[in-house]
Amino acid sequence: GATQVTLSECLFFFALIFSAMMMEENPTEDGLTPQAPHQIPPAWTKDNLAYFCGYCHKEFGMLLRKHHCRHCGKVFCDECTRFRAKIPQMGIDEMVRICEYCRRDAQGLIGTESMQRPSEVKKCVQCAKGFGVVGPSAAKHNCQHCGKVFCADCTRWFAKIAHLGYDKEYVRVCETCKDLPNTFSRLYEWQRDSDVTACNECLAEFTRSFRRHHCRHCGKIFCSKCLKAKALVLGDPKPQKICNACSTSGSSDLKVVK
């Protein structure tokens, strides 16, 4: 019988054809903004023309974000751009995101490193606590700057990292990286659950049934009654709970949902 072609396959071939025809030399929607002409890759693929990862071919969506390789300018998923390197021939002297293809080629790259895979790490790099099988103790987080794997407490700092393509969203960084000078455009810390015994607003004491909740903007801890406002925080696809102070702050990082 006739071979059936799925919609995903059609979109994939459409993307291949048009990504070869329409390239641009300017940064696009993922927020990367090279500082000088020599930092722009030879061909910078438009975000709106990239439907699939250029390496693993997974389809992009709300849960699979797009990232540019700073060396070749093509678009890939986070996993396929987990490598970091300096690109001196383009005037880039800091570790930036590169793809699997460029890592293998390695021409013009210095100091190539890879993000650790959480599945291969058994204990937190910072506090050395072993990861559990289920529950909060099982949560593993990459520091998005150095790539190492930590527990939630040891990656409780959130920052924008423009040179890695994170200047529209906040990502986790570790205690060591948070102190690096001139690295992050904004940095804030989540309060530890163990450090807070009462809501930061109404001062009601927390119990096993009266739980703690983090404001997704300032990182402070509140009770559910004092965390009713919602806003689109840059980088989040859906509204997040924020505290009353943040909801009335007028911050450019927030779009309050009423």
Image (tube, rainbow, N blue to C red):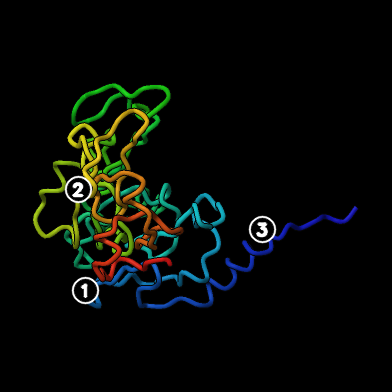
Residue located farthest toward the right when viewing the structure as drawn? 1
x and y percent of residue 244 in the render? 28, 59
**Tag shown at residue 8:** 3
Amino acid type at circle 3 is Ser
The residues tagged by marks 2 and 3 sit, at their Cα atoms, a distance apart of 41 Å
On the image, numbered disc 1 is attached to which residue? 35
The residues tagged by marks 2 and 1 sit, at their Cα atoms, a distance apart of 28 Å
Question: 10 Å neighbourhood of mark 2: few (<14), some, or many (≥20)?
Answer: some
As displayed, is residue 182 above or below residue 56?
A: below
The residues tagged by marks 1 and 3 sit, at their Cα atoms, a distance apart of 36 Å
x and y percent of residue 42 in the render? 36, 72
Amino acid type at circle 1 is Gln
* Mark 3 element type: helix
**Pointer 1 and pointer 3: residues touching (CB < 8 Å)?**
no
Residue 250 in which image quadrant: bottom left
**Pointer 2 and pointer 1: residues touching (CB < 8 Å)?**
no
Residue 166 or residue 169, whichever sits in front: 169
Query: At 21% across and 76% down in the image, what residue appears?
Result: 36
On the image, numbered disc 2 is attached to which residue? 189
Query: At 35% across and 61% down in the image, what residue appears?
Result: 233
